[in-house]
Image (tube, rainbow, N blue to C red):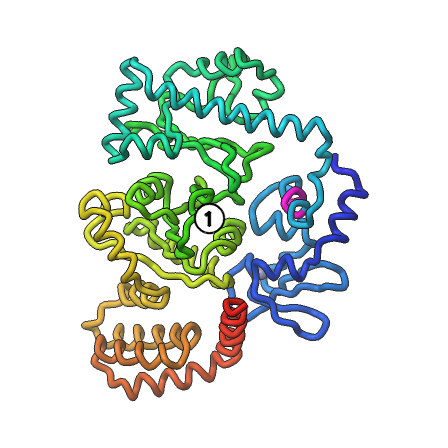
């Protein structure tokens, strides 16, 4: 149980307006702040933050609460996790982070390092299963240097081997339990969560190993197993390969779908490739990326799931000052495959010529219509115009109106007229975007 005084102190040190403002674009309205609700989809703001009571309320979906419940809800984490997050934000020691917890934390970190060494040694052993694992990484196009750099490994078929290894190194049962590396069978037998899988360690920003991702080498299920949340691993706050990307000279990040894409891109020399950890992108991860990047290129798979994830991520980045582009990969299902087929240079060229978010949205929209049908063509223009009115500036509107005219054989003048009306209608919203833009350029000039 976390002491009452601790929560009070945490609440005192947290400003809910500032907190919510790092996720949602807020605008002052008298004594309140309003914005688009992050918990339901809406076009006009019905989400309010009340500084006086340090609370929030949404008139659209009735989401309500204080700073702790906001963090909990938006990151989909437990109250305990939310309190820890807020504590680190407020510069407070973790709740009940007495010597005992601190010691356990550092023991778990050192155990993870040992486990990574173990998995790596297993990969390099002479037994047949290790040979298969090495062949797997090889098939994925990874060279020895990359395997060492990322500390890749192999979890052997023997689910008890790691347990024995760590016990021999002197880790006690409480520590082993806290690591998240082991499970207990109904009969009480302890075995490793990962067996017969190729292993990827996950690092925090300081370079500690905090978790693992394990993948099967064939088509068996589940394809991926990842470490659970532990004392040291908070999934929604972790960005894979961020410890490398943050040191890059480039502030242009490439956000990929999975570990394999990241590792393959990094091997190809793109040292700002990162991905969310075993989950859909979270607001917390967007916040971390936005701290280090000026621009983010979304580079997801070209299948329907990947395109949906792209749209979702675009929404999450909407309130971030980061400029977002969307990479479309012609002739390959994902970046990894493209790099293998055409080489790193051509992939880099693809990155350099990346389209913006608006291009991506308009293409998605166009794909829904059959432009040879009059009615559908009109509907497409109508929706495209709405989108442009809401999400673009006058220069972009001029350019895109021209493109729309070419695509649909409707005169540019007619499209611009429609656009004029739509812009007026979306006026309030457009001004907000404009303010946001001003805010952004202000931040960049600092
Ligand atoms: Zn809502």
Circle 1 SS class = loop
Reading the image, the residue beneath label 1 is 246
Q: Residue at x 45, y 41 (%)?
A: 277
Please identify the dominant SS of the magenta region: helix
Ligand 1's image quarter is bottom right
Where 97 sits versus 6, above or below? Answer: above
Q: Residue at x 27, y 85 (%)?
A: 412
Residue at the far right in the pictured view:
5
Where 76 sits versus 367, above or below? Answer: above
Left or right: where does residue 367 sit relative to residue 189?
Answer: left
Position of residue 376 measured from the top left corner of the image (x, y, whole percent): 26, 72
Residue at the far front in the pictured view:
249
Q: Tell me the quarter of the image containing the C terminus.
A: bottom right
Q: Residue at x 48, y 77 (%)?
A: 430
- Queried on whether the Cβ of the residue with tag 1 lies below 8 angstroms from ligand 1, the answer reads no
Position of residue 10 measured from the top left corner of the image (x, y, whole percent): 74, 48
Where 169 sits versus 431, above or below? Answer: above
Left or right: where does residue 377 sit relative to residue 162?
Answer: left
Left or right: where does residue 51 sit relative to residue 259?
Answer: right
Position of residue 201 measured from the top left corner of the image (x, y, whole percent): 43, 32
Q: Residue at x 30, y 78 (%)?
A: 399
Q: State the extent of the magenta-drawn residues as a range.
A: 82-86
Locate residue 16: give its quadrant: bottom right
Q: Can residue 4 be seen at all in this image of the molecule? A: yes
Q: Is residue 165 magenta?
A: no
Where 100 sits versus 411, above or below? Answer: above
Q: Relative to the observer, which residue lies in front, 220 or 12?
A: 12
Left or right: where does residue 328 sit relative to residue 88?
Answer: left
Q: Tell me the quarter of the image containing the N terminus.
A: top right
Q: Relative to the observer, which residue lies in front, 15 or 45?
A: 15
Q: Relative to the observer, which residue lies in front, 17 or 242?
A: 242
Q: Can residue 187 be seen at all in this image of the molecule? A: no
């Amino acid at each position: 149980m976390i002491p009452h005084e601790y929560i009070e102190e945490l609440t005192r040190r947290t400003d809910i307006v500032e907190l919510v403002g790092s996720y949602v674009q807020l605008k002052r309205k008298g004594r309140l702040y309003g914005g688009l609700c992050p918990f339901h989809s809406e076009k006009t703001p019905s989400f309010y933050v009340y500084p006086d009571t340090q609370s929030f309320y949404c008139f659209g979906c009735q989401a309500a609460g204080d700073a702790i419940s906001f963090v909990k809800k938006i990151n989909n984490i437990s109250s305990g996790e939310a309190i820890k997050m807020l504590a680190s934000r407020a510069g407070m020691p973790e709740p009940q982070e007495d010597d005992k917890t601190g010691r356990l934390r550092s023991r778990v970190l050192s155990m993870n390092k040992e486990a990574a060494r173990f998995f790596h040694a297993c990969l390099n052993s002479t037994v047949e299963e290790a040979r298969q694992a090495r062949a797997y990484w090889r098939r994925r196009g990874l060279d020895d240097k990359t395997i060492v750099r990322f500390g890749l490994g192999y979890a052997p078929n023997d689910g008890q081997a790691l347990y024995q290894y760590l016990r021999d190194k002197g880790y006690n049962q409480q520590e082993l339990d806290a690591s998240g590396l082991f499970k207990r069978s109904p009969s009480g037998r302890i075995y490793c969560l990962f067996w017969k899988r190729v292993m990827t360690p996950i690092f925090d920003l300081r370079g500690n190993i905090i978790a693992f991702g394990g993948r099967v080498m064939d088509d068996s299920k589940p394809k991926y197993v990842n470490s659970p949340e532990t004392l040291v691993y908070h999934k929604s706050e972790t960005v894979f390969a961020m410890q490398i990307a943050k040191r890059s000279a480039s502030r242009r990040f490439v956000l990929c779908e999975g570990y394999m894409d990241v590792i393959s891109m990094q091997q190809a020399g793109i040292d700002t490739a990162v991905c969310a950890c075993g989950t859909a992108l979270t607001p917390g991860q967007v916040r971390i990326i936005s701290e280090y990047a000026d621009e983010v290129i979304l580079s997801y798979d070209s299948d329907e799931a990947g395109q949906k994830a792209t749209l979702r991520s675009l929404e999450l980045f909407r309130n971030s000052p980061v400029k977002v582009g969307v990479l479309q990969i012609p002739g390959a299902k994902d970046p990894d495959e493209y790099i293998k087929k055409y080489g790193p240079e051509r992939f880099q060229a693809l990155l350099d010529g990346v389209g913006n978010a608006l291009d991506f949205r308009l293409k998605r929209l166009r794909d829904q219509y059959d432009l040879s049908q009059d009615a559908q063509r009109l509907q497409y223009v109508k929706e495209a115009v709405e989108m442009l009115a809401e999400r673009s500036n006058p220069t972009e509107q001029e350019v895109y109106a021209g493109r729309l005219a070419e695509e649909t054989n409707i005169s540019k003048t007619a499209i611009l007229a429609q656009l004029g009306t739509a812009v007026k209608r979306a006026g309030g919203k457009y001004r907000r975007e404009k303010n946001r833009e001003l805010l952004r350029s202000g931040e960049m000039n600092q």
